[in-house]
Image: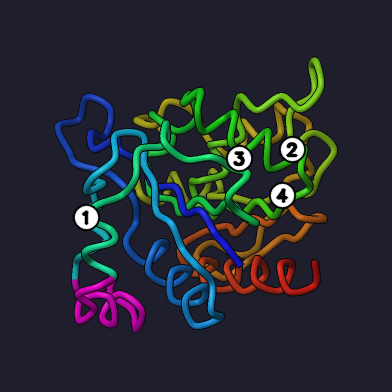
Amino acid sequence: MKILMVLTSHDQMGDTGHKTGFWLEEFTSPYYVFKDAGADITIASPKGGQPPVDPNSEADDALTESTRRFQQDAHAKESLASTKKLADVDMNDFDAIFYPGGHGPLWDLANDQKSIALIKTAYEQDKVIGAVCHAPAVFKNVEVKPGQNIVGGREVTGFSNSEEEAVGLDKVVPFLLEDMLKQNTATYTRGEDWAPHIVVDGKLITGQNPASSEGAAKAVVQALQGA
């Protein structure tokens, strides 16, 4: 199992002056699910090198078993600090592509031409595609047929409008994820705010929020092992 994990390189929360990036637990939980399943993991980001971590995800109340494991894992930290540039990766080398969330992807990966091309290739080659929390933003501009978005007619989830309102960022983000998915004719489903909710539609796997990251990653492994 060769899995490409793609992280954001964007670190500014609009023009608020606050920092953002990827959400640590949404990277560490899937990373260890994949690693413990024996997967070969490559990490990439638009700019390469160390991607920005959302500082809020390193706060004590956001830490989880997987983030604590990561803090003690020199090899994982080195892998994260030296991500490949997206421009240098080829989807032909991987069996699956997985996007952790955090607010960053709403700004960069949603519009990143290389990311869009990787997802399109993965779709055309019937590979597993996963995204959790805000990361389904990466599907915004992925057309698989003229006028048809990759999520069109598919069942998906992602960070809900009510969760965005709860964190007070519904007026800051460039677009609301739930609205974007619905506009692209996805069947959007959700669980309770902050509760795990994972949707598997064929080889497209999405998770609603940070609590869904482990379950979404396990679904990716299952899909790969069943392939």
Residue at left offset 54%, top offset 55%: 132
Q: Is residue 37 above or below residue 101?
A: below
CB contact under 8 Å: marks 2 and 4: yes
Mark 4 belongs to which amino acid? Val
Q: Which residue is mark 2?
A: 151
- Quote the CA–CA distance across marks 2 and 3: 12 Å
Disc 4 vs disc 3: which is toward the camera? 4
Residue carrying label 3: 178
Amino acid type at mark 2: Val
- Mark 2: few, some, or many residues within 10 Å (few <14, many ≥20)? many
Front: mark 2 or 3: 2
Quadrant of residue 144 within the rendered picture:
top right
Determine which of the numbered discs, if any, sits on residue 81 in the image: 1
User: Which region shows up in magenta?
Assistant: 60-75
Secondary structure of the residue carrying tag 3 is: helix
Amino acid at the residue labelled 1: Ala
> Do the numbered discs 4 and 1 sit on residues whose CB atoms are within 8 Å?
no
**Cα–Cα span, label 2 and label 4:** 7 Å
Mark-to-mark CA distance, 4 and 1? 31 Å
